[in-house]
Amino acid sequence: MRELTGPELIAMHEAAGAAAPLLLLDVREAWEFALGAIHLAGTQTLHMPMNEVPARLAELNPAQPVVCICHHGMRSAQVVAFLSHHGFDAAYNLAGGTDAWSEQVDPNLPRY
């Protein structure tokens, strides 16, 4: 499975630019998403709780790079495995999830 740290995600985003915009797929529950989410200029953030991913798979483009995000990186790792099994060759897990992002990149993102 492919994993990215917060700084690696920023570097990937900056290198890709508008030519290959990333999709940030936040698979946390609604109450977690309401606390705060990761946003990067020029990317789309889509909230899709983990248990909804199989039913909503058609909403995702397998050709678009997808970075899956959860609180600590465990649920998102499972979603990456599921997406990879369904032909998403550019699916990545944000290592450490929003918790690590808050420590490494944006201390304004609430920790819980």
Image (cartoon, rainbow, N blue to C red):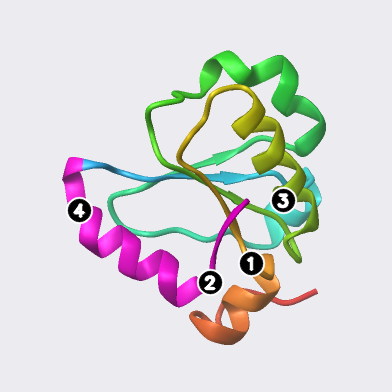
Distance between mark 2 and mark 4 Cα atoms: 18 Å
Q: What amino acid is labelled 2 in the image?
A: Thr
Which is in the foreground here, disc 1 or disc 4? 1
Residue at the spot 73% in from the left edge and 15% down from the top edge:
55
Task: Estimate how packed mark 4 is, as few (under 14), some (14 to 19) or many (20 or more) residues with alpha carbons within 10 Å.
Answer: some
Q: Position of residue 103 (x, y in %)?
A: 61, 85
Q: 19 left or right of 77?
A: left
Q: Look at mark 3 in the image and give the residue it sits on.
A: 77
Q: 89 left or right of 111?
A: left
Q: What amino acid is labelled 1 in the image?
A: Ala
Q: Magenta segment, which residues?
A: 1-19
Give the camera-side residue of 53 and 88: 88
Q: Looking at the image, is mark 2 or mark 4 earlier in the sequence?
A: 2
Distance between mark 3 and mark 4 Cα atoms: 25 Å
Residue at the spot 76% in from the left edge and 66% down from the top edge:
72
Q: What amino acid is labelled 3 in the image?
A: Ala
Q: Position of residue 2 (x, y in %)?
A: 56, 54
Q: Secondary structure at mark 3?
A: helix
Q: Are marks 2 and 4 in contact (CB under 8 Å)?
A: no
Q: Are marks 1 and 2 in contact (CB under 8 Å)?
A: yes
